[in-house]
Image (cartoon, rainbow, N blue to C red):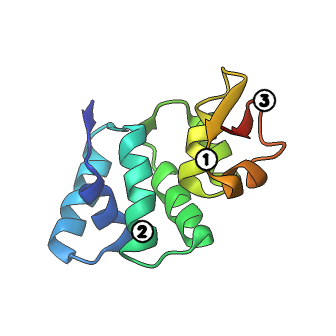
Amino acid sequence: MVAADTNVVVRFLTGDDPEQYQKACQLFEQEIVFLPNTVLLETAWVLRHAYNFDKDMIVIAFHKLLGLPNIQIHEPQLFKNALDWIDFADALHLAFSQEVDILYTFDQNFSKRSNNKGDCSVKIL
């Protein structure tokens, strides 16, 4: 098994560099590729801020990526929950905090949007 960096994932999802896109496709076809949570989080950020993807486009892109048979991630169900919930980064924080009672934040919007999402409560500190 190998792992891939964010730039490999972004090339695959956007195809903006044809040569690198082909290399990313070959990697994802020929190897079992682990994608760390940090790569997934950074990929969402890059797609949103550098490529102007909206939430729906990011969800579609991740479904394309995670639908590949050779892709492995840590805690796939928690990641799926994050895709279905609020802002992706906040949702990923919340999804991976389900083993605790409270996730504290100063972000009031995060607290409001996270209401009734999972077992962990998001509260303002």
Q: Quadrant of the N terminus?
A: top left
* Disc number placed over residue 106 in the picture, else none: 1
x and y percent of residue 29 in the render? 31, 50
- Sequence-wise, the earlier of marks 3 and 2 is 2
Q: From the viewer's side, name the closer residue of 34 and 53.
A: 53
**Rendered residue at 84%/42% (across/down):** 116
* Disc number placed over residue 47 in the picture, else none: 2
Relative to 18, residue 32 above or below? above
**Rendered residue at 78%/29% (across/down):** 119
Query: Distance between the Cα atoms at labels 1 and 2?
Result: 25 Å
Q: Left of 61 or right of it: where is 26?
A: left
Secondary structure under the numbered disc 1 in the rendered image:
loop
- Sequence-wise, the earlier of marks 1 and 2 is 2
Q: Left of 87 or right of it: where is 17?
A: left
Secondary structure under the numbered disc 3 in the rendered image:
loop
Q: From the viewer's side, name the closer residue of 90 and 61.
A: 90
